[in-house]
Image: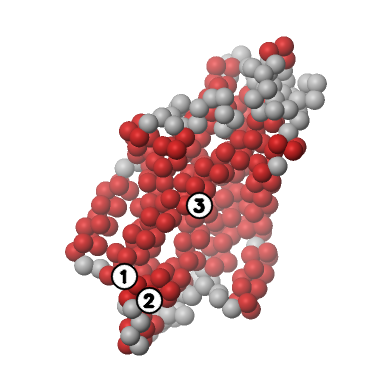
Amino acid sequence: MIFDATGGEPRFSEMMPPTSAAGFRRTLIKLLKSKLTCTGAVIVLFWLFLGIFARYFSPYGPLDVEMSIRLMPPGFSGHLMGTDNFGRDIFSRLMSGARISLGLGVCSVAISLVAGVLTGGIAGYYGGKASGLLMRFMDIVQAFPTLVLVISLSLAMGRNTYSAMLAIGIAATPQFARLTYAQTSLISTGPMVESARAMGIPEPLILFRHVLPNCLPVIIVRVSFSLGSSILSLASLSFLGIGVKAPTPEWGAMISDSRNFIISGEWWLFTFPGLAIASLILAFNLLGDGLRNVLDPHS
């Protein structure tokens, strides 16, 4: 654990994550006792389970078209959530869409996590004019509204799924970079780093073995919140026709397909995909709040 440079109490931002088995068990017990963490984790695991095993539990194929039963309400002839304008089972499409939304969301956050942590960590540890210019560039990127930046990048790179995923990852990179930069700048001036340097440990080894692990608690919390926002951004792009294309059963694309039926009364077309998006975003926010309460003793 690193102490404040002023000699005060140890700060959360400089707190080593538990590395021993006993420390891991204590953290795990705290997480299991946290209602926010458990509630969020249960919802995420529910959608993850449905997404992974959709092909085994789906009563119908997500792309099966049957025009004779189009726009049927929930409960009609075994269709739990009704059918869409092509007679496709909405419940089956929701389960398949969970795999797409979670998969693309995790990939986009992984892009921003790796790029942001490396950028912020190196800039914060080594400092200098180059690091200052790099972080000013991150400030400029972060100054743009997230959705506007994501739409612009997606259009520039091409209207496809991979461009949308990459655009979301690039737009979220400054968040991780700024967070890691702040933590690394603080930790690198502490006695632990000074002792490691006095022992002759190479600078890169100090950064990746001793400094960045101290940033893990806040990074983990940031990942949880970013997963929810990335799924919302992906759904927004698909709704606008920039992200996942029809007939792929992505939740945002399903809402986009149903917008012509809002006034005519087919409420189930957009209600169930909307609830799915809302529940998953809420779950990641609850999970992030719970992790923050457990990992941050001063919260």
Q: Is residue 223 above or below residue 237?
A: below
Q: Alpha carbon of mark 2 to alpha carbon of mark 1: how far?
A: 10 Å
Residue 221 vertical position relative to residue 53 in the rendered view, above or below: below
User: Which residue sits furthest left?
Assistant: 129
Q: Do the residues labelled 2 and 1 touch (CB within 8 Å)?
A: yes
| Picture residue at 35% right of the left edge, 82% below the top | 201
Q: What residue type is labelled 2?
A: Ile
Q: What kind of element bears circle 3? A: helix
Q: Is residue 291 above or below residue 272?
A: below
Picture quadrant of residue 20: bottom right
Q: Say what amino acid the circle numbered 1 marks.
A: Tyr
Residue 140 locus on image (x, y percent): 26, 48
Q: Identity of the amino acid at label 3? A: Phe
Circles 3 and 2: CB atoms closer than 8 Å: no
State the CA–CA distance, disc 3 to disc 2. 28 Å
Q: Can residue 172 be seen in this view?
A: yes
**Residue under circle 1?**
125
Could you say which is closer to the camera, residue 261 or residue 243? 243
- The residue singled out by tag 2 in the image is 206
Give above or below for 252 relative to 50.
above
Q: Nearer the viewer, mark 3 or mark 2?
A: 2
Q: Which residue is drawn at 62% across and 39% down?
A: 98
Where does residue 238 sit, x and y in percent of width and height? 49, 31
Q: Is mark 2 on a helix, strand or loop?
A: helix
In the rendered view, does 190 fall on the left or right side of 279?
left
Q: Which is nearer the N-term, disc 3 or disc 2?
A: 2
Q: Mark 3 points at which residue?
A: 225
Badge 2: residue crowd in 10 Å (few <14, some 14–19, many ≥20): some
Please report the residue visible at 59 percent of the width from the left and 17 percent of the height from the top: 261
- Farthest residue toward the top? 68
